[in-house]
Structures are given as C-alpha cells and as structure tokens.
C-alpha cells in the first residue's frame, strides 16, 4: 500500500509536503510577563522564526496567552503561535481556541490512560472546530508507565506511544497534526524517528514530523549535538519542522536551525574540501567561512556516519575564518577538541561528563543559564557521568531521561538534587547547591 503523506497548517505556515523546512523556537520568558514575551517574540520573528512556541502552564495563563497574541497581531506580527501544554488537558482545550497550534504530550493529560484518551478526543473536537493544528510531542523519559511497562524506556516505546495517539487522530478524521519524538541522547532520538517513520508508512498515513534533540545544552556542545541528531534524521528525508534547543538566548537557536533547514533543501553546502578514509578513520579538510560554520558542517558531514558506526574516528585540518575574515589553521589541539566533542555527541566516546540541560521556558524557576555554567565549571573533572540541569520541578525530573544526577530548580532560590529519578536533597539554597551536587557525586564514587 502506498502511504499518504500529510501536511499540517498553522496559520499561514504549511508544515510538510513540498514546503520548506519550518524553523521554530520557543520563548523562555514567563508567560504572565506579556510585555517581555511580546518583545522576545518580535526578536524571534526578526531573526527568522516561522513558528513561536510559548509555554502555558495552566488555565491561569490563558488570559496572558490571549493578550500576547492580541498584542502581536496589533503590532503586525502574524507569526503563528504554538501553546506548549503539559498535564492539563483543560488548558490545552482553552489554548486551542486562541492560538494556531497546540503542542501536547497526550500521555500526561491524565494519570489514568483511559481518561487521557477521552480528554484527547475532546481536545481534537475543539481543534477541529477552530482549525488549530496539533503537535503530538513525546519525549524520552516522560512516556508514562502504561507504555514503558510494555516496551521499556526505549525508542520503540516512543514510536509505539506516538502511533497510538496518531491512530486516534486518524479515527477522528483529524489530520492537522505534527508528531515529534525528542530525546537528549542522539542515538535514542534517531532510532525513535526511524521507527516512527517506518510505522507511519506501514499504517499508510505519514504525518509531518517535528525534529529536535531536546536538552542539548549550550555553546559548541549544544550546537554539535543538535546538528548530529537533526541532520541524521533530515538526511533520511524525515522532518518538516525543526527546533534547535539551546540553553541560551533562544534567538541564538535560529541561525543554527536555518542552516540545517537550508542544507537539507540543497541551499547551502558544506565547506568540506577533501576527505581521506583510512580504515574506519577519516581525515577531513575544511575551508570554513567561520568557526561556527565549521562546527555545523562537520557535525552534519560526519555525525550520521559515526552514529551508525561506519566510522570510528575523525580528525580535522584546514582553516576557518575568524571574525575579521582572516584564515585560522585548525591545529592538532583544536582538531582533538572537535573530534572529542563530535564523538561524545554521537555517544561513541565520553571524554567529559555528559550534560543534559533544558533550554528553559516560562516555567523556569531560576537563572538556568548561570546555573548550567556553574555546574559545568565545577563538574568538568568528573569524567563519565550524566548530569542534568533542568529549569523546573514540574517537568524537569520527568525529562531528565537517563541522567545519573539532576540539578532541578524549585523556585524561591532553592534547588532539588536527584540521583537518577530519586530526589536526594530538597530545598538546597542556590548558593550551596553546586557544592552539594559535587560532594554527592564524589562520595558516590568512593
Ligand atoms: S524542564 Fe525546562 S524547558 Fe521543560 S518545562 Fe521545565 S523549565 Fe521548561
């Protein structure tokens, strides 16, 4: 049976089909701060975002969401808005009457799975009436026992869970749907999207796909990890809209996402000038127009081949241009650094702790970017350990996936420290929390 490739429409943006890959991002402002959120949305629109997501923690935020939308439209900003909803199906239903698209994880609509299904049907009815698009957005680590009891916390479980909700959409004759399966672990994320695409093809309905690596962190690591995961999936023809999640000003996400969107629509080409392969090791030569471009190019050129174990090692040579346009040689130290970062992003070799850090959103309880930098600075010597730094106590613990340790903002300048999924220290003042985390990790190793 040939499968039907579907498209979704949010406002004036089509997702899927022959449309360009849609670049999107998400506000990290508090939604109740209408002024700041509107200002950030305008900056995002100006930087090239074609969809903007805003967290809506509960019904109390619905009037703020309405105000943000009204203010943007009055200012002539027509960029479609996406409400990001967790746990509250009533909030999702209310938001579907206001904005062009709503992202939900229907599995957390209700603790009782049958009731979650019933609420999902109510939600779809409202979306149908208002012409609202839906993203069924599942993340590794927050799947729910009903599915992990059957399949473990695996890519298969992620794809199976998504298919259940997509089948409900098909049964309701509702097709204005996008689906995502994000993970911080690039191997898990890539495998989940591959399985999902195969299952949708077998079902006969291929919904548009939103691709992203969640909680990728910041700086070079965040960019390399995001490009490895997203480019692998896009190179296989999977993906219609993307978000690069960085624990930075969200405007910084947009050039990275735009690069990926352009690259997989053949509008931009790698600065790789030569590559020689010896056994399973590649030596790559670049003439990159900037340092950032070098990072993005090499992640896309070699990420998939390292993830899929076609290659074991890559070293780099050649040049990139500095901010003044002068060529800088890629010396051995920089090549080793790039190789270490790339192999870590592909989960082939761990030369430093693996960090999971959410990008922050309107739920964030503290200065996430500062906290993440402090945790990185104090734990860099700890070697092979996975540390999550999460912005809120509501979603953070569920989304830390396979982290060994979690550092989670509680609000009121307090932090909870987790060992795996268990909170081991609560209400730790922010000023002491990094010390306590390091002590716990070191004590655990003795
Ligand atoms: S974990 Fe981070 S991105 Fe996710 S809801 Fe909480 S603050 Fe927002």
Image (spheres, rainbow, N blue to C red):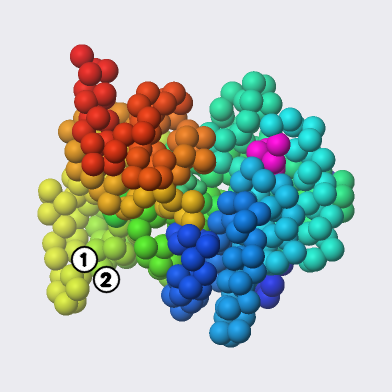
Q: Residue placed farthest to the front in the image? A: 412
Q: Quadrant of residue 84?
A: bottom right
Pick the front one: 23 or 86: 86
Residue 375 — which label?
none
Say which quadrant the C terminus sits in: top left
Q: Which residue is denoted by mark 1 in the rendering?
A: 320
- Residue 205 in the image: state x and y as whole percent: 78, 50
Q: Are marks 2 and 1 in contact (CB under 8 Å)?
A: yes
Pick the front one: 182 or 365: 365
Q: Is mark 2 on a helix, strand or loop?
A: loop
- Residue 175 in the image: state x and y as whole percent: 79, 56
Residue 23 visible to an observer of this rendering: no
> Would you say residue 109 sits in the magenta stretch?
yes
Q: CB at mark 2 closer than 8 A to ligand 1?
A: no
In the figure, 152 relative to 106: above or below?
above
Q: What stretch is highlighted in magenta?
A: 105-110
Residue 428 visible to an observer of this rendering: yes
Which residue shows up at 80% across the image and 66% down it?
Answer: 130
Task: Specify whether 28 is left or right of 143.
Answer: left
- Residue 382 in the image: state x and y as whole percent: 21, 30
Q: Which residue is denoted by mark 2 in the rendering?
A: 289
Q: Residues within 10 Å of mark 2 (few under 14, many from 20)?
A: some
Q: Earlier in the sequence, mark 2 or mark 1?
A: 2
Give the CA distance from mark 2 to mark 1: 6 Å
> Would you say residue 81 sits in the magenta stretch?
no
Task: Specify whether 117 is left or right of 436.
Answer: right
Which residue shows up at 74% across the image and 30% down it?
Answer: 112
Pick the front one: 302 or 380: 380
Which residue shows up at 84% across the image and 63% down it?
Answer: 129
Which residue shows up at 68% across the image and 75% down it?
Answer: 12
Q: Quadrant of residue 277?
A: top left
């Amino acid at each position: 049976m040939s499968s039907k490739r579907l498209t979704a429409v949010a406002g004036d943006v089509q997702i899927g089909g022959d449309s360009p890959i849609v670049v999107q991002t998400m506000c990290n402002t508090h939604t109740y701060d209408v002024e700041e959120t509107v200002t950030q949305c305008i900056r995002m629109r100006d930087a090239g975002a074609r969809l903007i997501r805003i967290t809506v923690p509960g019904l109390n935020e619905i009037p703020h969401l309405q105000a943000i939308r009204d203010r943007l439209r009055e200012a002539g900003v027509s960029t479609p808005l996406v409400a990001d909803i967790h746990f509250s199906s009533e909030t999702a239903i209310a938001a579907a009457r206001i904005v062009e698209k709503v992202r939900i994880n229907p599995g957390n609509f209700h603790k009782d799975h049958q009731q979650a299904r019933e609420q999902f049907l109510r939600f779809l009815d409202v979306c149908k009436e208002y012409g609202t698009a839906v993203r069924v957005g599942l993340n590794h680590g927050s799947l729910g026992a009903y599915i992990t009891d059957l399949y473990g916390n695996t890519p298969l479980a992620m794809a199976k869970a998504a298919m259940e909700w997509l089948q409900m959409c098909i049964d309701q004759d509702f097709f204005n749907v996008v689906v995502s399966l994000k993970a911080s672990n690039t191997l898990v994320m890539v495998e989940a999207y591959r399985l999902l695409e195969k299952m949708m093809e077998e079902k006969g309905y291929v919904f548009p796909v939103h691709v992203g690596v969640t909680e990728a962190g910041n700086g070079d690591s965040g960019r390399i990890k995001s490009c490895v995961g997203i480019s692998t999936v896009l190179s296989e023809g999977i993906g219609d809209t993307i978000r690069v999640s960085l624990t930075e000003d969200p405007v910084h996400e947009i050039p990275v996402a735009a690069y990926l969107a352009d690259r997989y629509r053949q509008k931009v080409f790698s600065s790789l000038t030569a590559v020689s392969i010896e056994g399973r090791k590649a030596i790559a030569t670049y003439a990159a127009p900037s340092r950032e471009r070098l990072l993005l190019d090499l992640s896309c050129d070699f990420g998939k081949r390292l993830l899929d174990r076609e290659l074991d090692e890559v070293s780099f040579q050649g040049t990139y241009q500095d901010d003044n346009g002068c060529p800088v040689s890629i010396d051995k130290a920089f090549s080793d650094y790039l190789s270490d970062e790339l192999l870590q992003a592909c989960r082939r070799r761990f030369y430093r702790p693996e960090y999971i850090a959410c990008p922050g959103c309107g739920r964030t309880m503290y200065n996430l970017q500062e906290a993440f930098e402090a945790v990185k600075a104090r734990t860099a010597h700890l070697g092979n350990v996975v540390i999550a730094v999460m912005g809120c106590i509501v979603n953070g613990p569920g989304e830390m996936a396979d982290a060994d340790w979690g550092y989670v903002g509680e609000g009121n300048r307090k932090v909870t420290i987790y060992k795996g999924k268990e909170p081991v220290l609560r209400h730790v003042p922010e000023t002491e929390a990094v010390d306590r985390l390091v002590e716990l990790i070191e004590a655990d190793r003795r």
